[in-house]
Image (tube, coloured by chain):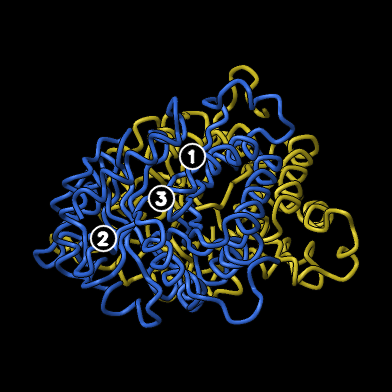
Chain colours: A yellow, B blue
């Protein structure tokens, strides 16, 4: 069991310190799809880990967070999950000051959420996790009560069809606004909540920012999914010129030069801060 | 990669045949929490698998489906996932006529959903999977287009706080009704969709049944969570006296006598059909 020794710095505090230390709001998404790995990693015993270790070394200087996406490890079965375990061990040993986010969109009844919280925070040792709000606060309590960890709740997702339910009007407001409001005013009692708002919806991002004060927002969808950096930064910064975790996955990790691509994106983000 | 040879019987067809063959609507939930395993399994190299194999042999005669809950395997890390893989291999070899459901409540943007679909259907070889609707149909297409597999979409969940979002009024209807309607009328083009409605909400179950015709509904929450068998069966049966997958997890697998408990529940369900 990792990451449980004594009183820990909170996930958010760890993130804020890192942001200041390397002047970066960039999160590198480890969406390490086996079918897209460069040839050189395919014959390693643990290809996803070998690739991740290389990406981490290429990009860590410009990253304030790393976000492994569970789907790509599960797709490779138990050996894929071994690669995830090894990636987390590598990050803890070599880059303990960089926030780690489990992108799993988890959420189930409370007894099952308790097992997911154990998996994510204790077994794998993540600092934070993405969560789906559909089952309500009560179901997510086993995550929310882990006050040293980060709970990042889906609000307005980055996909083209996100509005099918998220835009449905409830008392004249879209559902995503209700989610933002509940998380900000009720779920965040321990100060460990964040929200997910896709980079592909800067207008909604601006409205979320107007409603949630200084809360940190994870913004996926920059790059391959089409989100534009300037719009996202201008729409999403909080009063301290921060409060964003801006994620790029495929556009960095499968770039010809991940190091240079990460540096450029970090700098491009800072241009608008 | 398992379960991909030639033209397969669909997941729903497999389930219906099994229901007729063993006269059972019972699904045994493999919520195999390490901390609750009987002492005798703890020192096995793969405790969750050893326990599951025993539970499967105790209960298969009365079961039309087995539903491993991903959280409890992930909580044990890569070795837990190995136990899941071995459980699925065991079921395919020994009980290929019993439906297998991955209880993962998955759902992400389409490129990630594609990786989850690979994980669930190909890598582990499940027949069906539980899915969260919050990101909309477009995000779940990689599951929905797998026409031989089952897509079981959360509608009204069994937890006490389920109503926080699911009961919110949209055009005068609770959100869960909108989900039921969209799945029945739009998402189910390939005839491979089902819904999740908790046993703890029989009134809602009856209303869902009234709206979705013959569609099969997965009903968790019998037993430990408090759902009552008679109410559930009377509220949920379709016109053919079937169309339900009634799941019990902890109340069977951690019973003193899982075999007898499963038999009794199967018979109790049949009493009201």
State the residue at coordinates (68%, 48%): B86
Query: What residue does disc 2 label?
Result: A175
Counting from the top left corner in percent of width and height, residue B93 is at: 65, 57
Counting from the top left corner in percent of width and height, residue A15 is at: 59, 40
Query: What residue does disc 3 label?
Result: B27
Does residue B83 sit above or below B119 in this rendering?
A: above
The front one of A229 and A122 is A122
Counting from the top left corner in percent of width and height, residue A30 is at: 68, 57
Q: Choose mark 3 or mark 1, whichever is in front.
A: 3
Counting from the top left corner in percent of width and height, residue B228 is at: 21, 40
State the residue at coordinates (16%, 47%): B231
Q: The residue tagged with tag 2: helix, strand or loop?
A: helix
Q: CA distance from mark 2 to mark 1?
A: 32 Å
Chain letter for mark 2, please: A
Residue A213 falls in image quadrant: top left
Which label is found at residue B31?
A: 1
Residue B264 falls in image quadrant: top left
Q: The residue tagged with tag 3: helix, strand or loop?
A: strand
Q: Are dots 2 and 1 in contact, CB under 8 Å?
A: no
The front one of A248 and A159 is A159
Q: Choose mark 2 or mark 1, whichever is in front.
A: 1
Whether marks 2 and 3 lie on the same chain: no
Q: The residue tagged with tag 1: helix, strand or loop?
A: loop
How packed mark 3 is, by other alpha carbons closer than 10 Å (few <14, some 14-19, many 20 or more), is many
Q: How many marks?
A: 3
In the rendered structure, the answer to whether residue A220 lies left or right of residue B260 reads: right
């Amino acid at each position: 069991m990792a990451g449980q020794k004594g009183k820990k710095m909170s996930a958010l505090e760890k993130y804020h310190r890192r942001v200041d230390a390397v002047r970066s709001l960039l999160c590198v998404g480890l969406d390490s799809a086996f079918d897209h790995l460069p040839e050189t990693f395919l014959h390693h015993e643990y290809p996803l880990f070998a690739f991740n270790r290389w990406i981490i070394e290429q990009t860590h200087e410009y990253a304030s967070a790393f976000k492994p996406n569970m789907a790509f490890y599960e797709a490779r079965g138990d050996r894929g999950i071994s690669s995830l375990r090894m990636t987390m061990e590598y990050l803890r040993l070599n880059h303990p000051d960089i926030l780690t986010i489990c992108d799993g969109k988890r959420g189930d009844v409370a007894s099952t959420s308790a097992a997911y919280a154990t998996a994510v925070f204790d077994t794998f040792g993540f600092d934070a996790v993405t969560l789906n709000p559909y089952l309500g606060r009560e179901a997510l309590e086993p995550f929310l009560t882990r006050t040293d960890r980060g709970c990042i709740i889906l609000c307005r997702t980055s996909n083209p069809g996100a509005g099918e339910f998220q835009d449905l009007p409830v008392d004249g407001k879209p559902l995503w606004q209700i989610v933002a409001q509940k998380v900000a005013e009720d779920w965040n009692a321990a100060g460990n909540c964040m929200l997910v708002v896709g980079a592909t919806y800067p207008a909604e991002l601006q409205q979320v920012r107007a409603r949630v004060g200084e809360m940190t927002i994870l913004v996926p969808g920059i790059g391959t999914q089409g989100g534009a950096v300037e719009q996202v930064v201008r729409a999403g910064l909080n009063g301290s010129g921060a409060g964003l975790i801006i994620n790029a996955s495929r556009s960095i990790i499968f770039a010809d030069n991940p190091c240079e691509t990460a540096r450029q994106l970090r700098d491009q983000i800072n241009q608008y801060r």
